[in-house]
Image (cartoon, rainbow, N blue to C red):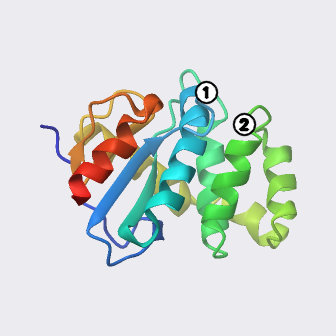
Amino acid sequence: MTQLKPLINSNDHLFGNPAASLELVEYGDYECPHCRRAYPIVKAIKEILGPELKFVFRNFPLSNIHPHAFMAAVATEAAGLQGRFWEMHDIVFENQKNLEVDNLLLLASNIGLDIDRFESDLRSKALHEKVEKDFESGMRSGVNGTPTFFINGRKFEGDWSRGALLEELRAVLA
């Protein structure tokens, strides 16, 4: 069984109940069509499980096949510096077909970010390194495609697209 390395920590963006015993981590790529299909499934799971779940998204941009994925990941991290990671995460997935930098700036503006700060943060070496560290942690954790999910630190090997992810999460809760 493949283990998550590192476990959820203070470098992660956490959605949900920090005290929840049920943890779901997704390694994803903002330009990946499979991740786009997983996005509403994960959103529904977060709603269904509510306070019983903590969710983390880690960047795993497959830059060789998705040329805008890395910068989209940096953009979500830049939004995170203004406390808006999850809003940017959502709006990027909802506008996946147009992830050029000009459109990322428009999306940032649409969620009310300080655009001058956002533009500056897009060039931040620290944010580029954060995305690279997420990717490296995915490699150490056995991620070889997106999306890849971990439940309480263990890699989920089932078919996330057909309800198996929610079933597995409920089984872990039970």
Which image quarter is the N terminus in? top left
Q: Are marks 1 and 2 in contact (CB under 8 Å)?
A: yes
Residue placed farthest to the front in the image?
174
Residue lying at 78% horizontally and 49% vertically, measured from the top left: 104
Residue lying at 42% horizontally and 60% vertically, measured from the top left: 55
Q: Is residue 5 visible?
A: no
Q: Position of residue 159 (x, y in %)?
A: 37, 28
| Disc 1 element | helix
Residue lying at 45% horizontally and 29% vertically, measured from the top left: 162
In this picture, residue 53 sits left or right of residue 75? left
Q: Which residue is mark 1?
A: 33
Identity, as a three-letter code, of the amino acid under mark 2: Gln
Above or below, 78 against 167 in this view is below
Q: Position of residue 86 (x, y in %)?
A: 61, 63
Whichever of callouts 1 and 2 sits on the residue coming sooner in the sequence is 1
| Disc 2 element | loop
Toward the viewer: 71 or 3? 3
Give the alpha-carbon distance from disc 1 to disc 2, as whole Å: 8 Å
Which image quarter is the C terminus in? bottom left
Q: Which residue is mark 2?
A: 96
In this picture, residue 77 sits left or right of residue 10? right
